[in-house]
Amino acid sequence: MEKWYSTMQKNFKQAFNEVFSLQGNKTDKNNKKNNGNNQSNGFKTEKEGLREEINLVEKTNQRDKGKESAKKGVGKAIMHQKEDYNLVNIVDSEKDKTSLISKSTIIQGNITTNSDLIIEGEVEGNIESKNCVVITGKQSGDIKCKNAEIKKAHINGNISVLDFINIEEGSTIVGDLSATSCKVDGRIEGNVDVKSDINIFKDAFIKGNVSASSISVENGAIIQGYINVKCENKQEDNKNVV
Protein backbone atom coordinates (compact mmCIF):
# COMPACT_ATOMS: atom_id res chain seq x y z
CA MET A 1 0.00 0.00 0.00
CA GLU A 2 2.74 2.43 0.89
CA LYS A 3 4.58 1.53 -2.32
CA TRP A 4 1.45 2.22 -4.38
CA TYR A 5 0.91 5.55 -2.61
CA SER A 6 4.52 6.54 -3.22
CA THR A 7 4.23 5.71 -6.91
CA MET A 8 0.99 7.72 -7.25
CA GLN A 9 2.56 10.69 -5.50
CA LYS A 10 5.58 10.55 -7.79
CA ASN A 11 3.39 10.35 -10.89
CA PHE A 12 1.27 13.27 -9.68
CA LYS A 13 4.33 15.49 -9.15
CA GLN A 14 5.64 14.64 -12.59
CA ALA A 15 2.28 15.47 -14.21
CA PHE A 16 2.07 18.69 -12.23
CA ASN A 17 5.52 19.78 -13.37
CA GLU A 18 4.75 18.93 -16.99
CA VAL A 19 1.50 20.94 -16.98
CA PHE A 20 3.06 24.06 -15.51
CA SER A 21 6.10 23.66 -17.70
CA LEU A 22 3.86 23.73 -20.79
CA GLN A 23 2.06 26.83 -19.54
CA GLY A 24 5.37 28.50 -18.86
CA ASN A 25 6.57 27.71 -22.34
CA LYS A 26 3.34 29.10 -23.79
CA THR A 27 3.73 32.23 -21.68
CA ASP A 28 7.34 32.68 -22.83
CA LYS A 29 6.29 32.16 -26.41
CA ASN A 30 3.46 34.65 -26.00
CA ASN A 31 5.81 37.14 -24.36
CA LYS A 32 8.35 36.70 -27.14
CA LYS A 33 5.60 37.06 -29.71
CA ASN A 34 4.29 40.19 -27.99
CA ASN A 35 7.80 41.59 -27.76
CA GLY A 36 8.26 40.88 -31.44
CA ASN A 37 4.98 42.56 -32.24
CA ASN A 38 5.91 45.53 -30.08
CA GLN A 39 9.26 45.81 -31.82
CA SER A 40 7.54 45.52 -35.17
CA ASN A 41 5.00 48.12 -34.13
CA GLY A 42 7.85 50.27 -32.90
CA PHE A 43 9.59 50.00 -36.24
CA LYS A 44 6.31 50.79 -37.98
CA THR A 45 5.75 53.79 -35.69
CA GLU A 46 9.25 55.08 -36.33
CA LYS A 47 8.81 54.63 -40.08
CA GLU A 48 5.45 56.37 -39.99
CA GLY A 49 6.95 59.18 -37.92
CA LEU A 50 9.80 59.61 -40.40
CA ARG A 51 7.34 59.52 -43.26
CA GLU A 52 5.18 62.19 -41.60
CA GLU A 53 8.24 64.37 -40.98
CA ILE A 54 9.32 63.99 -44.62
CA ASN A 55 5.80 64.86 -45.81
CA LEU A 56 5.75 67.87 -43.48
CA VAL A 57 9.11 69.11 -44.80
CA GLU A 58 7.94 68.62 -48.39
CA LYS A 59 4.70 70.50 -47.69
CA THR A 60 6.65 73.31 -45.99
CA ASN A 61 9.01 73.59 -48.96
CA GLN A 62 6.09 73.63 -51.38
CA ARG A 63 4.33 76.27 -49.31
CA ASP A 64 7.50 78.43 -49.17
CA LYS A 65 7.98 78.05 -52.92
CA GLY A 66 4.35 79.02 -53.42
CA LYS A 67 4.82 82.12 -51.28
CA GLU A 68 7.94 83.12 -53.20
CA SER A 69 6.15 82.60 -56.50
CA ALA A 70 3.19 84.63 -55.24
CA LYS A 71 5.50 87.43 -54.14
CA LYS A 72 7.24 87.44 -57.51
CA GLY A 73 3.88 87.45 -59.27
CA VAL A 74 2.61 90.37 -57.17
CA GLY A 75 5.81 92.30 -57.80
CA LYS A 76 5.46 91.80 -61.54
CA ALA A 77 1.82 92.90 -61.41
CA ILE A 78 2.70 96.03 -59.45
CA MET A 79 5.52 96.97 -61.80
CA HIS A 80 3.30 96.38 -64.82
CA GLN A 81 0.55 98.47 -63.29
CA LYS A 82 2.99 101.26 -62.48
CA GLU A 83 4.41 101.29 -66.00
CA ASP A 84 0.92 101.44 -67.52
CA TYR A 85 -0.03 104.18 -65.07
CA ASN A 86 2.94 106.27 -66.15
CA LEU A 87 2.32 105.88 -69.87
CA VAL A 88 -1.46 106.15 -70.16
CA ASN A 89 -3.39 109.40 -69.85
CA ILE A 90 -5.50 109.63 -66.70
CA VAL A 91 -9.20 110.48 -66.92
CA ASP A 92 -11.23 110.84 -63.72
CA SER A 93 -14.95 111.67 -63.90
CA GLU A 94 -15.79 111.70 -60.17
CA LYS A 95 -16.63 115.09 -58.69
CA ASP A 96 -16.85 114.53 -54.94
CA LYS A 97 -13.38 113.17 -54.21
CA THR A 98 -9.84 114.56 -54.25
CA SER A 99 -7.21 112.95 -56.45
CA LEU A 100 -3.65 112.80 -55.10
CA ILE A 101 -0.35 112.41 -56.92
CA SER A 102 2.07 111.49 -54.12
CA LYS A 103 5.67 112.70 -53.74
CA SER A 104 7.17 109.44 -54.98
CA THR A 105 5.03 109.35 -58.15
CA ILE A 106 5.99 110.51 -61.63
CA ILE A 107 3.21 110.78 -64.20
CA GLN A 108 4.12 110.85 -67.88
CA GLY A 109 0.90 111.80 -69.63
CA ASN A 110 -2.08 114.14 -69.48
CA ILE A 111 -4.49 114.31 -66.53
CA THR A 112 -8.19 115.17 -66.93
CA THR A 113 -10.40 115.23 -63.84
CA ASN A 114 -13.65 116.67 -62.50
CA SER A 115 -12.45 116.49 -58.90
CA ASP A 116 -9.95 118.48 -56.87
CA LEU A 117 -6.37 117.51 -57.65
CA ILE A 118 -3.32 117.62 -55.38
CA ILE A 119 0.08 117.14 -57.01
CA GLU A 120 2.94 116.43 -54.63
CA GLY A 121 5.03 114.46 -57.13
CA GLU A 122 5.93 115.17 -60.77
CA VAL A 123 3.69 115.43 -63.82
CA GLU A 124 5.02 115.55 -67.37
CA GLY A 125 1.90 116.44 -69.32
CA ASN A 126 -1.09 118.77 -69.41
CA ILE A 127 -3.56 119.06 -66.53
CA GLU A 128 -7.24 119.91 -66.85
CA SER A 129 -9.62 120.07 -63.88
CA LYS A 130 -13.09 121.52 -63.38
CA ASN A 131 -12.25 122.22 -59.74
CA CYS A 132 -9.20 123.21 -57.69
CA VAL A 133 -5.63 122.17 -58.46
CA VAL A 134 -3.03 122.32 -55.67
CA ILE A 135 0.59 121.85 -56.73
CA THR A 136 3.50 121.41 -54.34
CA GLY A 137 5.70 119.34 -56.67
CA LYS A 138 6.80 119.76 -60.30
CA GLN A 139 4.72 120.25 -63.43
CA SER A 140 5.82 120.32 -67.06
CA GLY A 141 2.83 121.19 -69.23
CA ASP A 142 -0.15 123.52 -69.44
CA ILE A 143 -2.75 123.79 -66.67
CA LYS A 144 -6.46 124.59 -67.02
CA CYS A 145 -8.66 124.64 -63.91
CA LYS A 146 -11.23 126.57 -61.91
CA ASN A 147 -8.96 127.55 -58.99
CA ALA A 148 -5.28 126.94 -58.30
CA GLU A 149 -2.89 126.95 -55.35
CA ILE A 150 0.83 126.97 -56.19
CA LYS A 151 2.83 126.16 -53.04
CA LYS A 152 6.63 126.13 -53.42
CA ALA A 153 6.15 124.34 -56.73
CA HIS A 154 8.00 124.54 -60.03
CA ILE A 155 5.83 124.81 -63.15
CA ASN A 156 7.04 124.96 -66.73
CA GLY A 157 3.96 125.74 -68.82
CA ASN A 158 1.07 128.14 -69.29
CA ILE A 159 -1.63 128.42 -66.60
CA SER A 160 -5.26 129.33 -67.36
CA VAL A 161 -7.51 129.69 -64.29
CA LEU A 162 -11.21 130.46 -64.49
CA ASP A 163 -11.48 132.13 -61.07
CA PHE A 164 -8.65 132.56 -58.55
CA ILE A 165 -4.98 131.58 -58.33
CA ASN A 166 -2.61 131.99 -55.38
CA ILE A 167 1.14 131.75 -55.98
CA GLU A 168 3.01 131.41 -52.70
CA GLU A 169 6.58 132.35 -51.85
CA GLY A 170 9.16 129.87 -53.14
CA SER A 171 7.12 128.97 -56.24
CA THR A 172 8.38 129.37 -59.81
CA ILE A 173 6.26 129.57 -62.96
CA VAL A 174 7.87 129.67 -66.40
CA GLY A 175 4.99 130.50 -68.72
CA ASP A 176 2.07 132.87 -69.22
CA LEU A 177 -0.68 133.21 -66.60
CA SER A 178 -4.34 134.20 -66.96
CA ALA A 179 -7.04 134.34 -64.25
CA THR A 180 -9.96 136.39 -62.93
CA SER A 181 -8.09 137.35 -59.75
CA CYS A 182 -4.59 136.61 -58.54
CA LYS A 183 -2.18 136.81 -55.60
CA VAL A 184 1.53 136.58 -56.32
CA ASP A 185 4.34 136.13 -53.81
CA GLY A 186 6.54 133.89 -55.95
CA ARG A 187 8.45 134.09 -59.24
CA ILE A 188 6.81 134.33 -62.69
CA GLU A 189 8.72 134.37 -65.96
CA GLY A 190 5.93 135.22 -68.40
CA ASN A 191 3.07 137.61 -69.02
CA VAL A 192 0.25 137.92 -66.47
CA ASP A 193 -3.29 138.75 -67.63
CA VAL A 194 -5.91 139.17 -64.89
CA LYS A 195 -9.51 140.26 -65.54
CA SER A 196 -10.16 141.70 -62.08
CA ASP A 197 -7.58 142.40 -59.37
CA ILE A 198 -4.02 141.27 -58.74
CA ASN A 199 -2.10 141.59 -55.47
CA ILE A 200 1.68 141.47 -55.82
CA PHE A 201 3.48 140.95 -52.50
CA LYS A 202 7.02 141.88 -51.40
CA ASP A 203 8.71 138.57 -52.30
CA ALA A 204 7.22 138.50 -55.81
CA PHE A 205 9.35 138.65 -58.95
CA ILE A 206 7.61 139.01 -62.31
CA LYS A 207 9.63 139.04 -65.51
CA GLY A 208 6.94 139.97 -68.01
CA ASN A 209 4.02 142.29 -68.63
CA VAL A 210 1.19 142.57 -66.09
CA SER A 211 -2.37 143.48 -67.09
CA ALA A 212 -5.31 143.78 -64.66
CA SER A 213 -8.29 145.99 -63.78
CA SER A 214 -6.86 146.61 -60.31
CA ILE A 215 -3.19 146.25 -59.35
CA SER A 216 -1.73 146.34 -55.86
CA VAL A 217 2.06 146.17 -55.54
CA GLU A 218 3.71 145.77 -52.14
CA ASN A 219 7.02 147.47 -51.40
CA GLY A 220 9.88 145.11 -52.25
CA ALA A 221 8.21 143.39 -55.20
CA ILE A 222 10.04 143.41 -58.54
CA ILE A 223 8.33 143.69 -61.92
CA GLN A 224 10.45 143.67 -65.06
CA GLY A 225 7.91 144.58 -67.74
CA TYR A 226 4.94 146.77 -68.54
CA ILE A 227 1.98 147.29 -66.23
CA ASN A 228 -1.39 147.81 -67.89
CA VAL A 229 -4.39 148.86 -65.83
CA LYS A 230 -7.60 147.92 -67.63
CA CYS A 231 -10.48 150.39 -67.59
CA GLU A 232 -13.95 150.04 -69.07
CA ASN A 233 -14.25 153.60 -70.40
CA LYS A 234 -10.64 154.75 -70.52
CA GLN A 235 -7.42 153.07 -71.56
CA GLU A 236 -4.48 154.32 -69.51
CA ASP A 237 -0.96 154.49 -70.85
CA ASN A 238 1.31 151.58 -70.14
CA LYS A 239 3.97 152.10 -67.51
CA ASN A 240 7.38 150.50 -67.47
CA VAL A 241 8.37 149.47 -63.96
CA VAL A 242 11.77 147.99 -63.13
Image: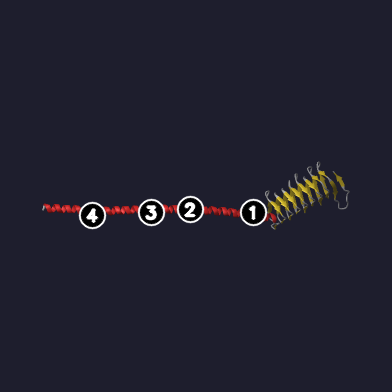
Q: Secondary structure at mark 1?
A: helix
Alpha carbon distance from label 4 to label 1: 88 Å
How many C-alpha atoms fall within 10 Å of the one at disc 4: few (<14), some, or many (≥20)? few
Instruction: Give the side of residue 180 with respect to residue 101, left or right.
Output: right
Q: Are marks 4 and 1 in contact (CB under 8 Å)?
A: no
Task: Count numbered badges in the picture.
Answer: 4
Query: Which residue is depicted at the point 50% across and 54% down?
Result: 58
Where residue 153 appears, x then y in whole percent? 73, 47
How many C-alpha atoms fall within 10 Å of the one at disc 3: few (<14), some, or many (≥20)? few
Q: Are marks 4 and 3 in contact (CB under 8 Å)?
A: no
Q: Are marks 1 and 2 in contact (CB under 8 Å)?
A: no
Q: Earlier in the sequence, mark 4 or mark 2?
A: 4
Where residue 69 appears, x then y in whole percent? 57, 54
Alpha carbon distance from label 4 to label 3: 32 Å
How many C-alpha atoms fall within 10 Å of the one at disc 2: few (<14), some, or many (≥20)? few
- Scheme of colours in the image: secondary structure
Q: Which residue is mark 4?
A: 19
Q: Which residue is mark 3?
A: 41
Alpha carbon distance from label 1 to label 3: 56 Å
Q: Earlier in the sequence, mark 1 or mark 3?
A: 3
Q: Which residue is mark 2?
A: 56
Alpha carbon distance from label 4 to label 2: 54 Å
Name the amino acid type tagged 2: Leu
Q: Which residue is mark 1?
A: 79
Q: Earlier in the sequence, mark 3 or mark 2?
A: 3
Alpha carbon distance from label 1 to label 2: 34 Å
Quarter in which the C terminus is drawn: top right
Q: Earlier in the sequence, mark 1 or mark 2?
A: 2
Where residue 54 appears, x then y in whole percent? 47, 53
Instruction: Give the side of residue 49 with respect to residue 204, left or right.
Output: left
Alpha carbon distance from label 3 to label 2: 22 Å
Q: Secondary structure at mark 3?
A: helix
